[in-house]
Amino acid sequence: MSPASKSQVHMKSAPSCAPETYAEIARILYAKTGINLPADNGSLVVSRLVKHLRALNLSDFESYLRWVGQPEHSEDLNTMISSLTTNTTRFYREPYHFDIFVEQQLPELMRKAKNGERIRLWSAGCSSGEEPYSLAATLLYHWPDVANYDVRILATDICAPALQTAESGRYPKGRLDAVPEPIRKLMLAEAHENDEMFTMPQAVRQLITVRYLNFMEPWPTKGPFQTIFCRNVAIYMDDKVQLTIWSGLIDLLPPQGLLFIGHSERLPPSQTDRVKLIDRTTFRRG
Ligand SMILES: C[S@@+](CC[C@H](N)C(=O)[O-])C[C@H]1O[C@@H](n2cnc3c(N)ncnc32)[C@H](O)[C@@H]1O
C-alpha cells in the first residue's frame, strides 16, 4: 500500500453538516443563549463540534442532533452549546477601560466603602476569567487593604470549561505579556519561578465569585453593581437580545455606576438616554 493510500485509510474525514441540520443547531443555540450564528456557516459547526460528535461515537450531524435533543443527554447539549460560544479573551483587553476605572471611579468607590457601603463589580460574560482577574488585580494594586471592606467582583458566564478555568485562577505566564508591569508582578506574587503556569494570588482570588449566569434565563442577581464590564458578548447577539442585555444591565447600575462595553459595541437608541457616554465605550448612569 502506498503511503498516501495508507493515510487515507487512517484519516477519518469530518462529516459535513447539511444546511437544514446547521439551521436547527443555530436555532437551538439562539433559543438557549441568544447567540446568532451567521447564516449557512456549516464549516464552523463542523470544526467546533466534530470532536464531541466523535467522542459520542456518532457518525453524522443528524444523529448528533437527535442525541443532544434527548432529555437524558442534557449534559451533551450543554457541551454543544459551550463548544459554539466564542471565548476569546485576554488579560487587560482594551486596557483604557482599566485606566478609566482607576481615574474616574475608584476614588469614589473607596470613599463609599470606607463609609460602610457595599461595593459590587460585575464581569458579565467573563469567559475564562482574564477580565475579572485584571479588574481584581487593578483594585488590589491601587487599594492594598481592599479586603478590609465589603468589595466583591461577580464573574459570570455560560461556558462550563471557561468557568472552570476562571474558578481555578490558573493560567500560562505567557498570557501576561500585555499586562502593565506592576500588575503583572502582583499577579505573579505566588508563582514558582520555573513553572510555565501560575495561580493568581489568594488576595486577588478572594475578591472574585465565579458563577454560571445566562442572559437568556432569569438573572439570579438584584444588584446594584457600581461597575459592570460586559464586553464583547452582545456583539454575537441580534438587536432584540442586545436590548434585553443592555437594558437589564443598566437597570442594575445605581446612579453614577459605570458600564464598560466592547470597542465595537453600541447601546441601542432606547438606552442612550438612561446613561451618559463619559469616555471610550464607557457609560455613566445619571
Ligand atoms: C468573547 S467572550 C468575552 C470575554 C470578555 N468579556 C472579554 O471581553 O475579553 C464572550 C463570552 O460571552 C459568553 N456568553 C455568550 N452567550 C452568553 C449568554 N447568553 N449569557 C452569558 N454569557 C454568554 C460566552 O460564553 C463567552 O465566554
Image (spheres, helix red, strand yellow):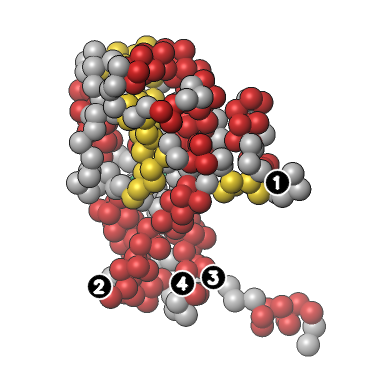
Nearest-to-viewer mark from 4 and 2: 2
Q: Amino acid at mark 2?
A: Pro
Q: Amino acid at mark 3?
A: Ala
Name the residue beneath numbered marker 1.
192
Give the image quarter of residue 4. Answer: bottom right
In screen coordinates, is 257 left or right of 265?
left
Q: CA distance from mark 4 to mark 2?
A: 17 Å
Q: Secondary structure at mark 4?
A: helix
Nearest-to-viewer mark from 1 and 2: 1
Residue at left 25%, top 53%?
31
**Residue 71 bears which disc, if any?**
2
Earlier in the chain: of badge 1 and badge 2, it is 2
Give the image quarter of residue 73. Answer: bottom left
Q: Secondary structure at mark 3?
A: loop
Earlier in the chain: of badge 3 and badge 4, it is 3
Earlier in the chain: of badge 4 and badge 2, it is 4
Q: CA distance from mark 1 to mark 2?
A: 45 Å
Label pair 3/2, CB-CB below 8 angstroms: no
Q: Position of residue 8 (x, y in %)?
A: 68, 78
Q: Amino acid at mark 1?
A: His
Q: Secondary structure at mark 2?
A: helix
**Please, which residue is most extreme toward the right here?**
2
**Residue 53 bears which disc, if any?**
4
From where the camera sits, is residue 153 visible? yes
Residue at left 50%, top 74%?
54
Q: Position of residue 271 (x, y in %)?
A: 23, 22
Q: CA distance from mark 3 to mark 2?
A: 26 Å
In screen coordinates, is 19 left or right of 202?
left
Q: Secondary structure at mark 1?
A: loop
In depth, the one of 120 and 95 nearer the eye is 120
**Residue 14 bears which disc, if any?**
3
Residue at left 52%, top 46%?
169
